[in-house]
Image (cartoon, rainbow, N blue to C red):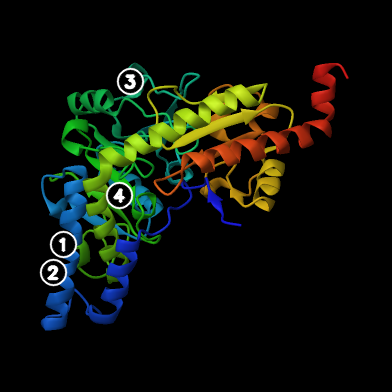
Amino acid sequence: MSIINLDYISANPLLVEVQEAMIEAIKTNYGNPSSPHRLGDQATMALDRARESVARLINAASPGEIVFTSSGSESINHAIKGVAWAKASKGRHIVTSNVEHNAVLKSVRRLRQMDYQITSVPVDGYGLVNPDDVAKAITDDTILVSIMHSNNEIGTIEPIKEIAQITKERKVIFHTDAVSSVGVVPIDVQELGVDLLSFSANQFYGPSGVGGLYIRRGTGLWSLIDGGAQENNKRAGTENLIGIIGAGVAADLAYRDMDKRVRHSRRLKERLVKGLKEKIEDIHINGHPEISLPNLVSVSIKYIEGESIVLMLDEEGIVVSTRSACASGSLRASHVLVSIDMDFADAQGTLVLAFGQEISESDIDRFLDVLVQVVATLRNMSPLYRQAKGS
């Protein structure tokens, strides 16, 4: 039985072209980009090509504005802590939102322990940040605003361009966590107006263990990792060259195939949402119905637990998630769902369904058929369901 993977938000499979490029690099490109000889020169050329590919994908003004990291989480930590430490003499206030990824939430929590002040703005029922709330939260001591581009649990895309206009007027550095967006939807850092942007290759069919940070020229921040002069003195340590080569190829393919991928994902999403609404009663589709990622659906199914659904679907060869992989293992309701005022019990029955170009309409249909059976089985055992239905 072939597996139907609807957990692309955790990691995408490597495309064949990416695999082949990395395998060839393992055989022939084993030099260190910092070495002053022909093997080092060869490695440097490969590193530069990958940097150019990523820069083109997000329309950075220069490849030098791209710093490769080990993950999206490292990139986020670098952006937030790097600005906080670099600008501490100017102020110690940071603005973020209630629905950020744990890498943001825990970074600002750490800074709070170091006497930084954090303001977290609320979101509406769709998970949207109001730019006016950001404007009101900014003070004379504010040094950084960090608002994610798209939410990795409910898919809502935030008004980043409008927020960037505010931060530019107030002369505050603006970072966006675009890990769930880069390579999935068109991203143009010039149009968005952000100063810092985090991304991760495993969200656009590249390898895990490779992320990056876009740093607009002139944006001041300290290094997170000290040591050598790699990554234009922004991130010490020998680069993960093989992984970065794979990320570069994945970026080229994402740039080339973006329109086709978006159309395919939207078609699957429409089919999935329509099927969920028609086949299962007492559900809620989370996130904004239009301003959202085309490859992600968050659905809350009343009266049953998401973990039980995941286990039963897995037995049928269908892989889904209940929340971000970085937050899995927690028994608490998702902070994102709590922030959009979802009832705790309903939040426990939430699935995050994310898909890519390898998923077909027939895969969506099979998932829906199996899910209907799983939900019926679990609801028949649920005292909450029997109570609600008066049986």
Name the secondary structure under disc 3: helix
The amino acid marked with disc number 4 is Gly
The amino acid marked with disc number 3 is Pro
In the drawing, what numbered circle is on residue 82? Answer: 4
State left or right for residue 381 relative to residue 6. right
Residue occupied by mark 3: 131
Distance between the alpha carbons at the discs numbered 4 and 2: 28 Å
Q: Position of residue 94 (x, y in %)?
A: 36, 34
Residue occupied by mark 1: 49
The residue drawn where x is 22% and y is 53% is 252
Q: Nearer the viewer, residue 125 or 335?
A: 125
Q: Earlier in the sequence, mark 3 or mark 1?
A: 1
Q: Is residue 180 above or below residue 38?
A: above
Residue occupied by mark 2: 45
The amino acid marked with disc number 1 is Arg
Distance between the alpha carbons at the discs numbered 4 and 1: 26 Å
The answer to which quarter of the image holds residue 40 is bottom left
State left or right for residue 150 relative to residue 242. right
Q: Position of residue 39 (x, y in %)?
A: 16, 82
Residue 324 visible in the picture: yes
**Which residue is farthest front?**
362
Q: Is residue 154 above or below residue 46?
A: above
Residue 177 visible in the picture: no
Do the residues bearing badges 1 and 2 touch, measured as CB atoms within 8 Å?
A: yes
- Screen quadrant of the C terminus: top right
Distance between the alpha carbons at the discs numbered 2 and 3: 42 Å
Label 3 CA crowd tier, 10 Å (few <14, some 14–19, many 20+): some
